[in-house]
Image (cartoon, rainbow, N blue to C red):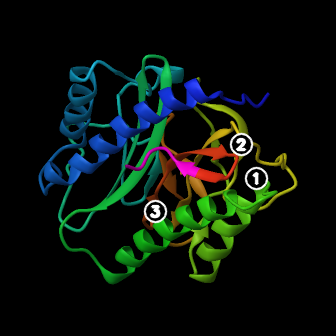
Amino acid sequence: MIILKNEAQIDGIRSSCHMLCELLDSIPGVLHDGLSTKDLDTYCHTWIVKRGARPACLHFEGFPAATCISVNEEVIHGIPKKNRIIREGDLVSVDLCINLNGFISDSARTYIVGKTTPERERLVRVTRECLYLGIEAAGKSGARVMDISRAIYDHANKNGFGVNRDYTGHGVGLNLHEDPEIPNYVSPRFSNPRLKPGMVIAIEPMIHQGTYKCDTLRDGWTVVTSDGKCAAHFEHTVAIMKDGVEILSQI
């Protein structure tokens, strides 16, 4: 069931999203060669709690950390570890969710650590472009979920990148995962509802350098590309409004 949010609820989600945006904006200041993903998770967890909020990912369906941190071939749901050391040239995807007074925000960015290869830079750029093309499609009058999916897939595909098919965006705001699913490719296996004012959704392209296929590691969480090539991940929480779309997780 899709939950349509009222104005007061969207205000609450917006506040949570703005807090999350501030945190993501601060990460380049602490991200460096030699930092462990566990140390980055501790930084994020402490930042959230100091501001009177809670990390919504922590213990969600058993996830053991406040932050999903995925490096290079890791697509999503990377578990922070002391022995997972970030190096120059790495792509580090940070996926965060904040619960502020019962309102949930969800956003992700892929950061480049120092200098990297031109192809990795292109992957990050195209994935970010996919996100904003998906948002643009969502803001058009009469748009449906698959309009978002088509915009994301077409841009990634024409640039020669694989589009993850096993994981999707989703409704968000009062719960971490709500209906509807927002896939990054067009398929009849998904419902295709029309976007209506009051819907709050997380749009999140997960784009691979090579094959679209992925695998899950033995930890039961970390998703990696099947060919070991890099992936990138960008995500915004957006609200469907009467006059278009508002990116809540952007200040």
User: Where does the magenta region start and end?
Assistant: 246-251
Q: CA distance from mark 1 to mark 3?
A: 23 Å
Please identify, in this view, whether the residue under mark 3 or under mark 2 is nearer the observer: 2
The residue indicated by pointer 1 is: 145
Q: Vertical placement of 200 versus 48: above or below?
A: below
Residue 233 sits inside the magenta stretch: no
Please identify, in this view, whether the residue under mark 1 or under mark 2 is nearer the observer: 1
The residue indicated by pointer 2 is: 181
Where residue 89 sits, quadrant-wise, is bottom left
Horizontal relation, residue 199 to residue 89: left or right: right
Picture coordinates of residue 20 (x, y %)? 36, 38
Q: Earlier in the sequence, mark 1 or mark 2?
A: 1
Horizontal relation, residue 65 to residue 202: left or right: left
Badge 1 local density, few (<14 within 10 Å), some, or many (20+)?
many
Picture coordinates of residue 205 (x, y %)? 56, 58
Picture coordinates of residue 239 (x, y %)? 60, 43
Badge 3 local density, few (<14 within 10 Å), some, or many (20+)?
many
